[in-house]
Image: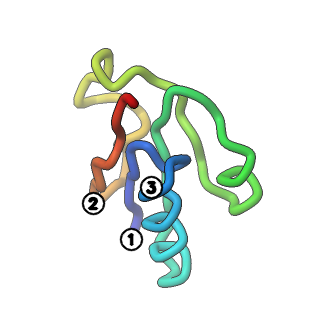
Amino acid sequence: MKALVTGGGGFLGQAIVDLLLKNNIEVVSVSRSRHESLTARGVEQFCVDLADMEPDHPAFAGCERVFHVAAKA
């Protein structure tokens, strides 16, 4: 299984990423910037403004679940 986490570098996003990885689920993250903590975990990252994402964006390829936890502080 493969899951996309928006805001994967944030507090809640990282907790979800860790839980998914612990359960052997491949994770992709979409954020405004890269996060070294996700790179260290082997998470594929896309730096994209969510307002500009189209449904055919490569980040969605093969994903069966989306966890939308991104927020603009």
Write down the residue under mark 2.
Answer: 65
Q: Quadrant of residue 70?
A: top left
Where residue 21 sits, quadrant-wise, is bottom right
Q: Secondary structure at mark 3?
A: helix
Q: Within 10 angstroms of label 1, few (less than 14), some, or many (20 or more) residues? A: few
**Left or right: 57 with respect to 26?**
left
Give the residue type that dot 1 points to: Met
Vertical side of 65 occupied by 20: above or below: below
| Colouring convention used in this rendered image of the protein | rainbow
Circle 1 residue: 1
Which residue has dot 3 on it? 13
Compared with 57, 43 (above or below) is: below
Secondary structure under the numbered disc 1 in the rendered image: loop
Residue type at the position of mark 3: Gly
Crowd around label 2: few <14 · some 14–19 · many ≥20 (10 Å): few
SS of the residue under disc 2:
strand
